[in-house]
């Protein structure tokens, strides 16, 4: 047990290192800070809701730098997209922190954070599951017909409609291969920033789907670009939470010790999978994180009178991180086996990049009708 004096609790330091590593793997892979998993986990470990949010968003800022460096090397960052999102995020973070401070004054910060987490995770899980499964079926169908499928298939036409909004200024995102109104991106940044400040997260779990389903960026570019904006939103959020006394920096350092290695592994793994695979992992992480928030919430509302709920919360919090890391490792292993002509499960084939990127050819959008296919490499 380690005594965290600022937070006023005692908890094993190894749990924080382990949490930082596993969330680093998941965050580097799906482009999120992982706060929607970490904040409930810290509550389970004994940190108050406002302290959990402050510690988490501070650790996210550091981890975002590590993962962004690797994604830049992989060519997954559209700097224009990232900086435009940041312009809206900064305003949103301030709003989110002020909302959290209101609930903190009412003594309801823990209940408010967990309730909001559960509602958001459940809604996003349902949508991403539906879309990702549709994209995977479309990928399998096109491959069976002999089409050359790239790294990205998205089963929605919504980005095309939003890209037609003639609200100046219109900007060109060269890496993301999108032309869209600047104000659409700014509004996305404002919304994710509000979530970041309130929940103590980087906002990636909503920003990555928004960049893909609303703006039309490829999943890989959405992941890399979102990690860049997480650096800014996380840094500003960390500053504001520090000013409010919500950060225990010893806890932050323990988490970063694990995140340094996890974020590198997760980022590299994205080079071996298609966009739907990343969204598929994101979907399951949202479902597990939703349950991870539900059990502590029920425990809080019942006055911690049911010991089984505390045990379930701890088990699920640790179990979800192990499960997601194992899933990512499995996809990476299957991709490597497929490149060697070895057997892999049929369900995994639509998710894998089975050839080195350098050997691929650009994919024409017309090949994926009626599914939006963003030109990518395989």
Image (spheres, rainbow, N blue to C red):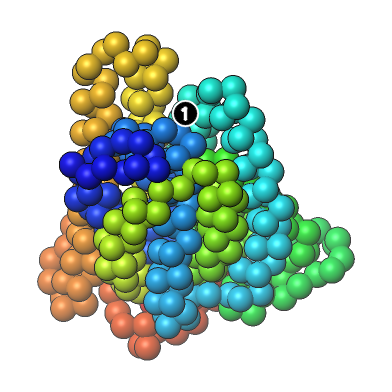
Label 1, on which residue?
A: 110
| Whether residue 300 is visible | yes
In the rendered structure, the answer to whether residue 340 lies left or right of residue 141 reads: left
Q: Is residue 254 above or below residue 376?
A: above
Which of the pair 351/123 is nearer the observer? 123
Residue extending farthest to the bottom is 358
Q: Is residue 330 above or below residue 306?
A: below
Q: Quarter of the image containing the N terminus?
A: top left
- Image location (x, y in percent) of residue 277: 36, 58
Q: Residue furthest left?
A: 342
Q: Is residue 115 visible?
A: no
Could you say which is closer to the camera, residue 115 or residue 137?
Answer: 115
Q: Quadrant of the C terminus?
A: bottom left
Residue 33: give x, y in percent of width and height: 44, 55
Where in the figure is residue 186, as x and y percent of width and height? Answer: 72, 58
- Mark 1 crowdedness (10 Å alpha carbons): few <14, some 14-19, many ≥20: many
Give the residue displayed 54% in from the left and 68% down from the top.
228
Q: Is residue 208 left or right of residue 88?
A: left
Which residue is rendered at x = 34% and y = 53% of the image? 250
Q: Secondary structure at mark 1?
A: helix
């Amino acid at each position: 047990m380690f005594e965290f004096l600022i937070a006023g609790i005692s908890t094993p330091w190894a749990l924080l290192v382990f949490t930082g590593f596993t969330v680093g793997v998941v965050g580097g892979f799906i482009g999120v800070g992982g706060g929607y998993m970490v904040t409930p986990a810290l509550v389970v470990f004994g940190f108050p809701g406002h302290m959990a949010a402050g510690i988490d968003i501070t650790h996210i800022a550091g981890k975002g730098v590590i993962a962004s460096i690797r994604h830049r090397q992989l060519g997954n960052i559209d700097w224009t997209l990232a900086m435009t999102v940041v312009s809206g995020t900064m305003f949103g973070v301030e709003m989110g922190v002020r909302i959290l401070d209101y609930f903190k004054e009412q003594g309801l910060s823990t209940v408010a954070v967990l309730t909001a987490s559960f509602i958001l995770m459940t809604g996003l899980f349902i949508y991403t599951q539906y879309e990702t499964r549709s994209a995977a079926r479309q990928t399998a169908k096109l491959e069976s017909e002999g089409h050359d499928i790239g790294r990205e298939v998205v089963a929605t036409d919504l980005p095309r409609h939003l890209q037609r909004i003639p609200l100046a200024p219109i900007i060109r995102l060269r890496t993301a291969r999108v032309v869209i109104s600047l104000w659409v991106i700014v509004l996305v940044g404002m919304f994710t920033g509000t979530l970041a400040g309130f929940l103590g997260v980087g906002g990636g779990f909503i920003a990555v789907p928004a960049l893909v389903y609303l703006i039309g960026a490829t999943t890989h570019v959405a992941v890399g670009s979102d990690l860049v904006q997480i650096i800014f939103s996380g840094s500003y959020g960390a500053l504001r939470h520090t000013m409010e006394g919500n950060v225990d920096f010893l806890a932050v350092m323990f988490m970063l010790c694990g995140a340094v290695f996890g974020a590198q592994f997760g980022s590299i793994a994205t080079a071996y999978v298609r966009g739907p695979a990343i969204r598929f992992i994101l979907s399951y992480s949202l479902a597990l994180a939703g349950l991870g928030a539900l059990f502590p919430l029920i425990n809080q509302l019942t006055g911690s009178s049911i010991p089984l709920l505390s045990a379930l919360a701890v088990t699920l919090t640790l179990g979800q991180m192990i499960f997601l890391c194992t899933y990512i490792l499995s996809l990476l292993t299957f991709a490597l086996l497929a490149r060697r002509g070895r057997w892999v499960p049929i369900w995994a084939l639509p998710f894998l990049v089975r050839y080195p990127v350098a050997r691929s050819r650009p994919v024409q959008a017309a090949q994926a009708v009626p599914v939006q296919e963003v030109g990518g490499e395989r």
